[in-house]
Image: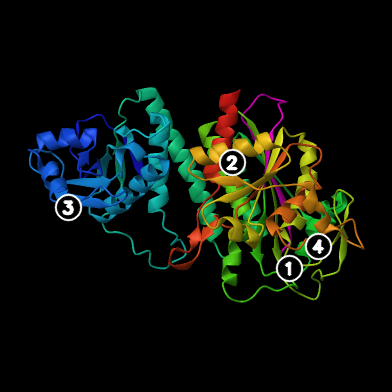
Amino acid sequence: MKFTIKSEKPAEARTGCVILGVFEKHKLSPAAARFDKAAGGLLTRLVKDGEIDGTCGKTLIIHYPEGALCDRVMLVGCGKEGEFNEECFCKAVSSTAKAANACGATDAVSYLAELKVNKRDGYWKIRTLVEKTESTLFKPNGLKSSKNKNRKPLRSLGIHPGRTDGKQAARALKDGKALAGGVELARTLGNLPGNICTPSYLAAQARKLGRAWKTIKTSVLEEAAMKKLGMGSLLSVSRGSVEPAKLITLEYSGGKKGSKPVVLVGKGVTFDSGGISLKPGAAMDEMKFDMCGAASVLGTLQACAEMKIKLNVVGVIPTTENLPSDKATKPGDVVTSMSGKTIEILNTDAEGRLILCDALTYCRKFKPEVVVDIATLTGACVVALGHHTAAVLSNDDELAEELMTAGKTATDRAWQMPLWDVYQSALDSNFADIANIGGRAGTITAACFLSRFTKDYRWAHLDIAGVAWKSGKAKGATGRPVPLLTQFLLDRCAAR
């Protein structure tokens, strides 16, 4: 999709479709009111006749409006004017992108960035408009022999910047494309089946990023090197598979030389059968999404490079399959992690924490400013927060607040759950330093497990099990939390 900044008046835009907002109670947006005047009151009549009631996200298309140069005008409901917020803006953008792509217009001009969104500036509106449009039009059909392409898809979108100055608008356009590209990479990788997206495939994608961007240096540790480092916990998960595990590192150098990096650690289980603690067969195909944490790190690093974010960022991705075999780790086995702590594995389906704990220990070598791990870790998180919100747990409340604030700005929300010492005893073991499961409060006890390996730095854990993919008819990876993570990094740049 091509995005440009357009300055024409609504009725003077020579385009396949002009996109305008309308609020409840027959209230036209300022741009719609200007168009209405040129069109002889056409929009006012349509609104008063009840053709569109202003409900957020509903659309109405009028062909060949008199008094205007466009082929179509699209009205989109924006809800109550005084309650128009980030969520409604995103819903309106997504609805118009879908409708414009289906109506036969190959180009359009949107005036939605003119609308007032509480506490959001023009940069945010333009960037979000680009990112949400691209996300809405994404199709996961890369492996289909017939792509069923729209004969006349939307190919370009002009954005009227309102009062946003040209320099800021251009930056928003560029950043929106970069963010959309990072989300698309994460979604594309997440949607690939386990027979294609193996640990070796993820390593190849990381190397590809390193070749594409001079600011990214990629390295990959093989199992022999991990064994020398003492990563017995990570390697206990890969034992059941013929696919070798990898530990991928991407170092993005955007900040001052020698400044401490932000380290992002992404869980990369490319298929999770549960191992010997085998999962039920229903919906097991969705366990290809168990590497969405890794995919989000790759997507975020790509966005960093394209935006030229002025920070040093390191991505660490432990990646493996988790399968049953005669060599697979068994419930009751005791393994030794890189930290030296011994772990009693009571359930081989609690494998994500086993690969993350060694990766978190490995992070110490980078002398990080902060570490954030991202993982589709627990079904309990879905029970607690559903499919709208990620969980954040941290040994530093300020860091947790940073992540939640970034999530709110990016409309990619997270919510803090407690990480209190009272939960730690659930991980007691008679035979090792720690057990890998802890009974109820599974999201919290999983984070308690990880916290044992993060004593040397500020750390936060994002459990994205409920938000990384969708099931049912709309099945597919979402690309979350690439928007949250990218905004988190942008906020840290701004704070400096």
Q: Which mark identifies residue 236?
A: 4
Of badges 4 and 1, nearer the viewer stands 4
**Residue type at tag 1:** Val
Magenta segment range? Answer: 242-265
Q: How far apart are labels 2 and 1 at the CA level? A: 29 Å
Is there a contact, CB below 8 Å, between mark 4 and mark 2? no
**Residue type at tag 2:** Leu
**Residue type at tag 3:** Glu
Check residue 245 for magenta coloring. Answer: yes
Q: Residue at x 25, y 48 (%)?
A: 106
Check residue 317 for magenta coloring. Answer: no
Read off the residue under disc 3. Answer: 51
Q: Quadrant of residue 44?
A: top left
Read off the residue under disc 2. Answer: 301
Read off the residue under disc 1. Answer: 242
444 in relation to 23, above or below: below
Q: What element does badge 3 sit on? A: loop
Of badges 2 and 3, nearer the viewer stands 3
Is there a contact, CB below 8 Å, between mark 2 and mark 1? no
Label 4 or label 1, whichever comes before in sequence order:
4
